[in-house]
């Protein structure tokens, strides 16, 4: 089995990745997401496709165009899974051959809220799944010395209190910015249980902190990483997501 780096003495899990019907000896060993005990956290299935996409965006030598392309594919997976957690009601339609089909439809309105600037990278993926969706923005920046978040700006739909909110931010490190964003939404009248937080990579520390402070918010993440280093950066992480997506 390949050796895996350690953070705070906790080893990331390494498993054979591939379809269940493949013999174990044919599956390459790869680092997969940690499991977490928090019931409000849903980690995407660690499929070969997802691990391959994450491998591409973690590579420091991946060029910006490829980083954007592969990140967008993961974002689409997150949005699709997030929509699975919204409430639905029974809905019957008639097919072109005159037969009834008993199905469902979404209940209530939704909107997206991106935590600027990295969260803005996830807006297009949401628009591709939800036509004409309204999107708000929150700007929270972290003090590099104290690692504490500070709110600088928010612009949200005036009826956001009547909507289900998909909160968008690709990285969850300490959880401070995401928690503050949830508090902003709650201050606008959004029930905590009406917020879904969509995230690419999280730290175990951030997940624990977030779940403790806002336990009714459901987290949809692609990967729970090894941990945080001394600078509170996610390890192994992928660097500064916003820089790699928008500028580098």
Image: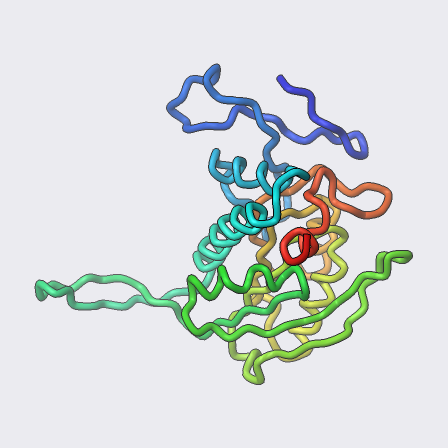
The answer to which of 37 and 61 lies nearer the viewer is: 61
Q: Is residue 102 left or right of residue 246?
A: left
Residue at horizontal 85%, vertical 57%? Answer: 147
Residue at horizontal 57%, vertical 57%? Answer: 198
Q: Residue furthest right?
A: 145
Question: What is the x, y in percent for residue 204?
Answer: 71, 44
Where 121 sits versus 156, above or below? Answer: above
Question: What is the x, y in percent for residue 209?
Answer: 74, 53
Q: Residue furthest top?
A: 25
Looking at the image, what colour scheme do you see?
rainbow
Residue at horizontal 46%, vertical 66%? Answer: 127
The answer to which of 124 and 196 lies nearer the viewer is: 124
Question: What is the x, y in percent for residue 26?
Answer: 46, 17
Where 28 sits versus 44, above or below? Answer: above
In which quarter of the view is residue 195 placed? bottom right
Where 210 sits versus 107, above or below? Answer: above
Where 98 sits versus 238, above or below? Answer: below
Task: Give the mark count.
Answer: 0
Residue 124 shows in the view = yes
Residue 216 shows in the view = no
Question: What is the x, y in percent for residue 211?
Answer: 68, 54
Q: Is residue 58 left or right of residue 81?
A: right
In which quarter of the view is residue 23 placed? top left
Where does the N terminus fall, quadrant-wise? Answer: top right
Residue at horizontal 48%, vertical 33%? Answer: 48
Q: Residue furthest left?
A: 97
């Amino acid at each position: 089995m390949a050796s895996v780096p350690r953070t705070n003495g906790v080893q990331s899990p390494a498993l054979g990745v591939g379809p269940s019907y493949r013999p174990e000896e044919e599956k390459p060993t790869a680092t997969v997401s940690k499991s977490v005990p928090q019931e409000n956290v849903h980690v995407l299935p660690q499929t070969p496709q997802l691990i391959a996409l994450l491998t591409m965006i973690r590579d420091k030598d991946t060029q910006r165009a490829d980083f954007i392309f592969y990140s967008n594919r993961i974002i689409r997976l997150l949005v699709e899974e997030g929509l699975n957690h919204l409430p639905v009601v029974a809905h019957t339609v008639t097919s072109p051959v005159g037969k009834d089909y008993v199905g469902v439809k979404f209940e209530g309105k939704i909107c997206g809220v991106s935590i600027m600037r990295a969260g803005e990278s996830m807006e297009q993926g949401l628009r591709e799944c939800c036509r004409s969706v309204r999107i708000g923005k929150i700007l929270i920046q972290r003090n590099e010395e104290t690692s504490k978040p500070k709110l600088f700006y928010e612009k949200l739909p005036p009826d956001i209190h009547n909507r289900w909110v998909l909160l968008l931010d690709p990285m969850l490190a300490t959880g401070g910015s995401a928690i503050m964003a949830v508090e902003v939404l709650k201050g606008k009248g959004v029930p905590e249980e009406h917020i879904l937080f969509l995230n690419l990579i999280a730290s175990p520390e951030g997940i624990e902190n977030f779940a403790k402070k806002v336990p009714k918010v459901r987290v949809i993440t692609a990967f729970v990483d090894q941990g945080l280093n001394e600078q509170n950066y996610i390890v192994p992480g992928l660097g500064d997501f916003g820089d790699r997506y928008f500028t580098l």
